[in-house]
Image (cartoon, rainbow, N blue to C red):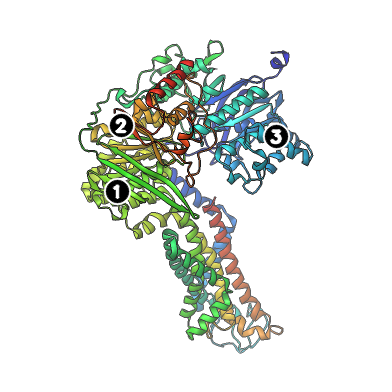
Amino acid sequence: MTTTAIATAALELHDLDVVYRVRGNDRQVLRGVSFEIGSGESYGLVGESGCGKSTAALAIVRYLPRNGRVSSGAVSVAGTDALALRGGALREFHARKVSMVYQNPGSALNPSMRVGDQVAEAFTVLGIPKGEATDRAQAALARVQIADPGSVMNRYPHQLSGGMQQRAVIAMALAKDPALLILDEPTTGLDATVEAEVLDLVAQLQSELSTSVLFISHNLGVISKMCSRVGVLYAGRLVEEGPVETVLQDPRHPYTVGLLRCIPRGGVRKDHGRLDTIPGFLPSLGVELSGCVFAERCALADERCHTEEPPLFDIRNGHESRCWYHERARELPRVEAADLDLPAVDRSEPALVCLEGCTKVFRQRGHDVHALTDVNVSIWPGETLGLVGESGSGKTTLARTLLGIVPATSGGATLAGRELPPRYQKRSRADLRAIQIVFQNPDSALNRRHSVQRILLRSLKKLAGIRGKVAEQRMSELAQRVRLTERTLTQKPVQLSGGLKQRVAIARAFAGDPQLVVCDEPTSALDVSVQAAILNLLVELQAEKQVSYLFISHDLGVVRYISDRIAVLYLGRVQELGPADVVFNGPHHPYTEALLSAVPTIDGGGRDRIKLEGDIPSAASPPTGCVFHTRCPRFLGDICVEQEPPLVEVEDGHQMRCHIPIEELRVLQAMETARA
Amino acid sequence: MTDLAVPAPAPAPGSEARAARKERLALLLRSPSFILGSIVILFWVACAILGGRVTPYDPLFDQTPDLGVPPSSEYWFGTDRLGRDVFSRVIAGSRDILLVAPLATLLATVFGTALGLTTGYFRGIADDTVSRVIDAVLAIPLIVLAVTVVSALGNRSVWSVTIVIAAVFSPIIARTVRASVLGEAQLDYVEAARLRGERSPYVMFVEVLPNVMPPILVEATVRLGYAIFAVATLTFIGFGLQPPSADWAVQIADNYPFLSDQWWTVLFPAIAISSLVVAVNLVSDAIQQVLER
């Protein structure tokens, strides 16, 4: 690097304090945050929700909401004092120096403007004439690897997939060749395969353009893949900072240690024991903290931590930690005892639930949409069947068919050998109580006008058929079981945190002692520490009550942790079905292989990503032969186009739908691993 | 899962919801338009209740020997051509309209909510049919529709006016309610209720209804303003309240042929009507702002 790189950092935050004014009081959200992003560097900011990540980004681009303000400190972007800018200078700053890419590309694009015009606008604000701006817009779309940019220019945002929309937003953000590009959870709403493509794109563009990047994410895997340095934010305080590998492999702050332990990774499964969690809650906004911000939740904390704020200790090579006991941070005692007694699943007994030849065809605008095609799966008592696949693969339809919300077009489900009526309206109370659901979003799943106790008592009445004193007794037991306090019972959902709400939803599902609970992404709206606690709860309930789960998730680490067996769905067909470890360790179906390689892991390294071409095809006109052949990285030839491979048992309990013999897959995939 | 720009409610601490409700009330009480509107409405309600008991003269029967006298210290708003004190009549004239308009609005709200809830919840053919009928009804000017119905009923009592206005307003309210219910019924708690075997009426009225109350409340207050106006209009063209009621619109209808000579007999009741309509709208605006913030 030459002298210019040393001269100005792309971003310098110095002792930044940000407060929000809420009901007449200033509440501090950022506490003396300082960090620096060098020219061409990519810096990751991680932390759970409410830690102040987005606030930091908004403060940098001067977009704080009206009740927020920088109370002290300095922000300098490429040498410009961002906080001093007013009026025209601020507009100029937005137009030329910084760009921001938000989480939801759907709302970042104007729905009533053609994509081409919107991207061109990013050039016209720079003073480029209209005609040239249009040409440059097309080039920009080509640069973000949008196929056929000419036709995309004329489309409206809703006609693009989520991944394409995010590419268009990135194209706009890069139009000005910004000194600093801020990406705020840019891939959080996207499928793993699409996420991988967008991340690859950002990495590639960054190396081409040597743009400095501030990457905000709650996903440590993404940060590990994308960034060279990382800062960990907790309660508005930067608690640890350093090179990514060092921080993730050798964390020196108890919060980082706790965060890393919460994440199911490295093949950990429920029979290895509980996940560790971080106890307690984030301090409420604006609370005066005299000592370390994390002291309340830290098992290492002593007197000194509660009274004296630790300074940033320099460990080595720019790795810094704000902990008095950073040398022992990794010895942080476990909060949850790991041991857990899980009875083994006995598959010699008859299965609890069987889906047999289950097919669902939706009629949509004159087209037949094949959401499910001949799905056969069984779930045994006490077993968790994980369901994975991209969006549109039929995971949710499968769950809804089982629940009776969507009746199957042909085929159906049996419960303990009995035929289940296809619609829930026709099911008996015993059938209804036997199969319950925990939804993804607890905000939507709980009636916000009803108190927790009302929700639970009603479920007990309808599902267990009990009321009065008996029901209240059972409610207390239920609440205790999911670790809700008595006080929570009288509260309404808005008063509860996301994790507590999800516990209420779980308690509701268990009101009638169900035999199968459908978990539809139950932890994807939660922070990792809360996710760990919820996963532990689900596993404990399973150990105790022998309940079975149908567990849908796009987080493969989570699925691997909780599932006994996993089914991989693609375009409504089961492509692979087998014991969790077998599906993960391989040999896998080429689709599973691609899915697995798309996930960025904290441990980094691993194999090269197997790229999937394009988007998932429309279920209205699925490809001929093997439905995966259009995107298959191991495409054989005509046989894949002409003949659909059957789902056959390739090993003991391991089914796969592929023309390539398993031995050949084993060899091919072993080569892949060896190469990495 | 990004942190919100505006701080989300902190986990656990208790009285957050109660505080929010309190804050809403405080916001209402701090809103000048709410205060002004409420004072005017309360004034007219008091007049309606006290009526002839507090007026200087009898509002209904000619008691003064002075016919058609302009406003003076003796007759503040003057007298009409039959010698009745206009001030007394304006005070007493709030009674009938404050009975008919709120009652009609209440009926319309109850019926419209039931209709909107049902169509929005069940959707399908019934919804399509009802919605098209509602669209068709709404295409006809309100007064034309009301006059037709009153004529058809052939009975010009207070009740028929109430029912006519309720009938005309119900579809409008139904449409608003339906729109809110459509969004609400997509939420998972509705599905959860069905999956524990709840019947549709329970889901509609116990689960969904409480969550769509804010827009219903706003719509009802807006409709109240229109209802007052509608009663006055119908009365003015002779299809509403009938003499000997001291109703404001009855007064206007009686006296407007003599507007050039005795302007006070029309102006003061007209101001009274406007003040009530404006006051109701001020209050409904304030409520809307607080609820939809």
Residue annotated with mark 3: A139
- Circle on res. A459: 1
- Rounded to the nearest angstrom, the CA distance separating label 3 from label 2 is 51 Å
Residue count near mark 1 (Cα–Cα under 10 Å), binned few <14, some 14–19, many ≥20: many
Residue B110 occupies which quadrant of the picture?
Answer: bottom left
- Rounded to the nearest angstrom, the CA distance separating label 1 from label 3 is 58 Å
Amino acid carrying mark 1 in the image:
Ser
- Rounded to the nearest angstrom, the CA distance separating label 1 from label 2 is 22 Å
Amino acid carrying mark 3 in the image:
Ala
Residue annotated with mark 2: A539
Q: Secondary structure at mark 2?
A: helix
Q: Report in which chain the residue with disc 2 lies.
A: A
Q: Are marks 1 and 2 in contact (CB under 8 Å)?
A: no
- Estimate the x, y position of residue B235 in percent, counting from the top left: 56, 80
Q: Of label 1 and label 2, which has the lower sequence position? A: 1
Mark closer to the observer (3, 2): 3
Q: Secondary structure at mark 3?
A: helix
Q: Of label 1 and label 3, which has the lower sequence position? A: 3
- Estimate the x, y position of residue B58 in percent, counting from the top left: 53, 83
- Estimate the x, y position of residue B36 in percent, counting from the top left: 58, 61
